[in-house]
DNA sequence: CTTGGAATGTCAACAACACTGACATAAATT
DNA sequence: AATTTATGTCAGTGTTGTTGACATTCCAAG
């Protein structure tokens, strides 16, 4: 890997990677890779009258069962009005359950129903399969670098959300 | 970097990275990082009545001046009707020029005007600045791994488009 | 040369999903 | 008790994706 692209360092800092052309290449890689990243779930969702927004909601409700609408909002980075439309259809279709909070009755706690979990599994399997293949092809060192760069690319808020998710597990 | 996450290998293959939890972490990293990746250009475009679609068109027209609508379609992966709406506004606003092909009059060759190049520069600068920071923080080895994994994540069509862009430079 | 089909691009209508604004209810504060 | 703050819902709008119908140009078969 690292196919001989000149990793020469000067003063402890690599310079070649910082040319505009190298950066542009990274930008395009990100664009094309993200398309691949979402392709499989998109295929599954098409025809179900669901979209990427539903997928995201289902994903994070699965990861943090009992989470509130407000909580989900912070993670997803959309307006609550936008999220609400998605949640409403998921609840109507029996994939998500909404329970009024015990201590604070303003809050709605969200969980996946059995069929919700089933769809989550289906979507997640597809996405993980692609990720697994990519990881296998690239090897463990590349994967470590991959995560390092991605994390460095996040805004601080997102970085916090990213780590917070991992604490609760 | 690669903060001691157990990279133990068995039979030449790393195993830890292939657990569902590790894969899920990669999926979420991808999600949050892409948000950061698009955040800066989005900020610039908001208020100009332009969106991400316009940014993408401008980016690739800049990289391949004189490209045709059909060509752009293959790269962007949207329908030509969708692209057309975006191109029309860009042409009306004087950011893009469309010239009928000399040999084939069906084709329209697209180039950026001076003001189109100016906007491209502005958007590109913002996105490259974030990329540059991320690369610097992560270091050259991480960057190599980053690109390796991203490429492995692409569909074959996208991989071809990704490399084709680099040939013409 | 003409004609029928393929390729390229445009126009119109519709669906998904983001947004802002207005509002109802519950909690916290004074 | 009254006001302010927080949470969630409903309604309307805009961007951007989609499919369908169409005009123009090229090319190849007759």
Image: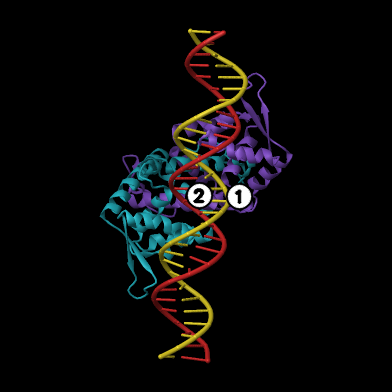
Chain colours: A purple, B cyan, C yellow, D red
Chain ID, mark 1:
A
Confirm whether residue A162 shows in the render. no
State the residue at coordinates (65%, 40%).
A90
Q: Is the C terminus of chain A in the top left, top right, bottom left or bottom right quadrant?
A: top right
Nearest the viewer among B117 and A160 is B117
* SS label for mark 2: helix
Pointer 1 residue: A41
- Crowding around mark 2 (Cα neighbors within 10 Å: few <14, some 14 to 19, many 20+) is some
SS for dot 1: helix
Q: Pointer 2 indicates a residue of which chain?
A: A
Q: CA distance from mark 1 to mark 2?
A: 12 Å
CA neighbours of label 1 inside 10 A, class few (<14), some (14 to 19), many (20+)? many
Note whether A102 is above or below C9 in the view shown.
above
Report the residue that reaches farthest toward the right.
Answer: A114
- Which residue is at 61% across, 53% downward? A46
Which residue shows up at 71% across the image and 40% down it?
Answer: A94
Position of residue B73 relative to residue B106, above or below, is above
In the rendered structure, find residue B150 and report the number of the disc placed on it: none
- Residue A142 location in percent, x, y? 50, 47
Q: Position of residue A70 (x, y in %)?
A: 56, 29
The residue singled out by tag 2 in the image is A34
In the rendered structure, which disc, 1 or 2, sits on the residue that comes first in sequence? 2
């Amino acid at each position: 890997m690292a196919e001989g692209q000149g990793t020469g360092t000067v003063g402890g800092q690599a310079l070649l990677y910082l040319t505009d052309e190298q950066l542009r290449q990274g930008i395009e890689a990100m664009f094309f890779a993200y398309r691949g990243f979402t392709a499989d779930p998109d295929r599954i969702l098409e025809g179900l009258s669901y979209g990427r927004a539903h997928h995201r909601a289902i994903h994070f409700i699965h990861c943090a069962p009992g989470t509130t609408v407000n909580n989900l909002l912070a993670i997803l980075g959309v307006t609550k009005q936008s999220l609400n439309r998605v949640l409403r259809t998921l609840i109507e279709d029996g994939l998500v359950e909404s329970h009024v909070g015990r201590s604070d009755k303003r809050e709605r706690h969200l969980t996946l129903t059995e069929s919700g979990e089933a769809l989550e599994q289906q979507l997640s399997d597809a996405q993980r399969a692609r990720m697994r293949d990519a990881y296998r092809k690239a090897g463990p060192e590349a994967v470590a670098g991959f995560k390092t760069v991605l994390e460095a690319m996040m805004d601080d808020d997102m970085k916090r959300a990213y780590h917070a998710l991992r604490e609760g597990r």
